[in-house]
Image (spheres, rainbow, N blue to C red):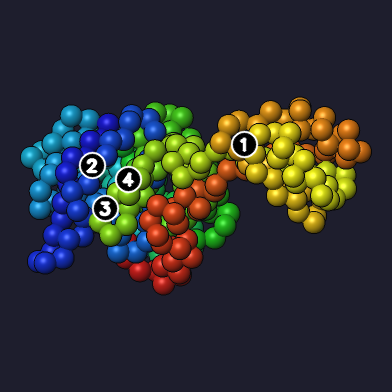
Amino acid sequence: MLSVANLKKTYGDFTAVNSISFEVQKGEIFGFLGPNGAGKTSTINMMIGLSRPTSGEVIIDGIDVRKQTKKAQSIMGIVADESNLYNEMNGFENLCFCAALYGMEKSEREAKARDLLEEFRLKDAGKRPFKAYSKGMKRKLTIAAALIHSPQILFLDEPTTGIDVESSRQIRKMIKALKEQGTTVFLTTHYIEEAERICDRIAFIAKGQIVASGTVLELMDSVSHGHSIRFVTSKFAENLTDELQSNFKGSKVTIQSDNTLIMESEERISLLPVMNFLYDKGIDVYEAKELRPSLEDVFVKLTGIESSVLTRDEKKGGRK
């Protein structure tokens, strides 16, 4: 659905986006994750035709955005980090106006507007002016407006930033529903947990360059070496470190004071022999869990940027 090749954007001597390339498949949710100043918004503006690339190309469903901007925009839905709807118009009027811009007939746009207000739980607010909406309601109506013409691909720039928890949950649910309906979603976000929860694939961008991309599992595997199992036991497995390591060659064992032990190995660890060994020592195993790095761990390792920077950027409300 989306192919970006050697995309670059410079402002004088400053390079905001440095020759990045990636692809987004039809019907997937693709996350673009990075701190303020990483190049997220510059990238999205070039992809939707609001900013001209210094070099490189963006192809959406076979359409060259640079050469056929209007045609490409006709199949896009765009939700900027700040709303572009009209404060004096009510929700219904805003949706109908957006539909008219796409050439939809009156009966069609009014029916679609009613359906979207219902779907986004804004029916009761449909006759209220947009300026009277809460932040969460404004964000939901802005997304509804971007969907009024049934776009093939939806661009969401920080869709849950600065809104309440319940509205954020509703928006994430809506994004998943759009995927199920076949809509491709390109999502920028500050929130690592949000990206991990809803995205099929993720790209990390830092200082204008993509440092890694892939599924959550692929990204985790890229920084994980070997296997690690955490065993929760019935009692402290004191003085068993050497014996465990001797019986299970190639393993490293760490005994912890909270009745747990960690076993690490380059090869996969078979649970039953370890559990039988401990049982013979009079120790029951209550839980055995494979330990994997979190997406936050992956982000920090690959970018060198502490995840707290993302939270701090969000609180500042700065540009991306």
Q: Nearer the viewer, mark 1 or mark 4?
A: 1
User: Residue visible at 58% across and 43% down?
Assistant: 292
Dot 2: what SS?
Answer: strand
Residue 92 in the image, given as x and y percentages of width and height: 39, 49
Dot 3: what SS?
Answer: strand
Question: Callout 3: 10 Å neighbours few (<14), some, many (20+)?
Answer: some
Q: Which disc is residue 167 wearing?
A: none
* Amino acid, disc 3: Gln
User: Residue visible at 40% across and 43% down?
Assistant: 202
Dot 1: what SS?
Answer: loop
Dot 4: what SS?
Answer: strand
Return the disc, 3 or 2, that comes first in the chain's sequence: 2
| Relative side of 137 to 4, left or right | right
Instruction: Give the CA distance from mark 4 to mark 3.
Output: 20 Å
Which residue in the protein does label 4 denote?
155
Rendered-image quadrant of the N terminus: top left
Question: Callout 2: 10 Å neighbours few (<14), some, many (20+)?
Answer: some
Which residue in the protein does label 2 denote?
21
